[in-house]
Image: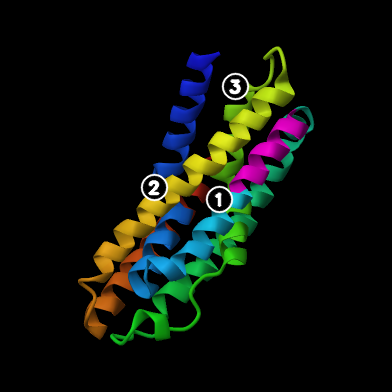
Amino acid sequence: MFTVFISMALFALVGSISPGPVNVIATSTAANYGIKRAMPYVMGATISYTLIVFLAGILLESLTTFVPQISGGMRIVGGLFLIYMAIKIATAEPNVGSKEERLSAPSLFDGAISQGVNPKAWMVSMSGVSLYVIGQGSSGYYLSIFCLFSFVICFIGVSIWAVAGSVIGQYLQSQRRQVIFNWIMAMLLIGSVLSMWLAD
């Protein structure tokens, strides 16, 4: 049992800390608004991912039947939302004043939606559930443990990206640097959408 839990934790860590659209937005948010203002986004993404893991565990049989039909739609809707977030990042007003005074940091809701429409989150959670929950003696118990690990480790993983953004933010004390950074982050986000769309 202990080795299953270690394996679960490592799986959750790899899934949450690997580069992806949610982590790019967390980095950009912390760089532009500070770590404190990035935390609602981080928490929204974490709660949403944990809910996705739970739903995958409850509905895995149904989801595996319908995933081929819905994954294309999820890619389009998710990609469009992430492009919208990229536009918000690219067009954010540069401000070298106090980070606390800046407006419109992505919210808890934005974090939840970003994660909820992220096909990678659904595929990773379904893979994890099929590996560590389905077929175990007490699947409800293992699903609860996997959800707990997913919550804690997703929060840590996305927070690491936000902390990195906060460190980067110390070097963005000119409007020009902020604009360049925001455009780079927006292009990375759009690149992740394009790679998701071209994956098939």
Kindly identify the residue that appears in the image at 38 percent across and 65 percent down: 35
Is residue 198 visible from the viewing direction of this image?
A: no
Q: Nearer the viewer, mark 2 or mark 1?
A: 1
Residue linked to disc 2:
19
Q: Quadrant of the N terminus?
A: top right
**SS at mark 1?**
helix
Q: Mark 2 and mark 1: span between their CA atoms? A: 15 Å
Is residue 82 visible from the viewing direction of this image?
A: yes
Amino acid type of disc 2?
Answer: Pro
- Dot 1 or dot 3: first in sequence order is 1
Residue linked to disc 3:
132
> Which residues lie in the magenta part?
49-60
Q: Quadrant of residue 58?
A: top right
Q: Which mark is residue 46?
A: 1
Amino acid type of disc 1?
Answer: Thr
- Dot 2 or dot 3: first in sequence order is 2
- Dot 2 or dot 1: first in sequence order is 2
Q: Is 62 rendered above or below residue 197?
A: above
**SS at mark 3?**
helix
Amino acid type of disc 3?
Answer: Tyr
Asked whether the residues under the numbered discs 2 and 1 touch, taking CB atoms below 8 Å apart as contact, a structural biologist would say no
Q: Quadrant of residue 44?
A: bottom right
Q: Mark 1 and mark 3: span between their CA atoms? A: 20 Å
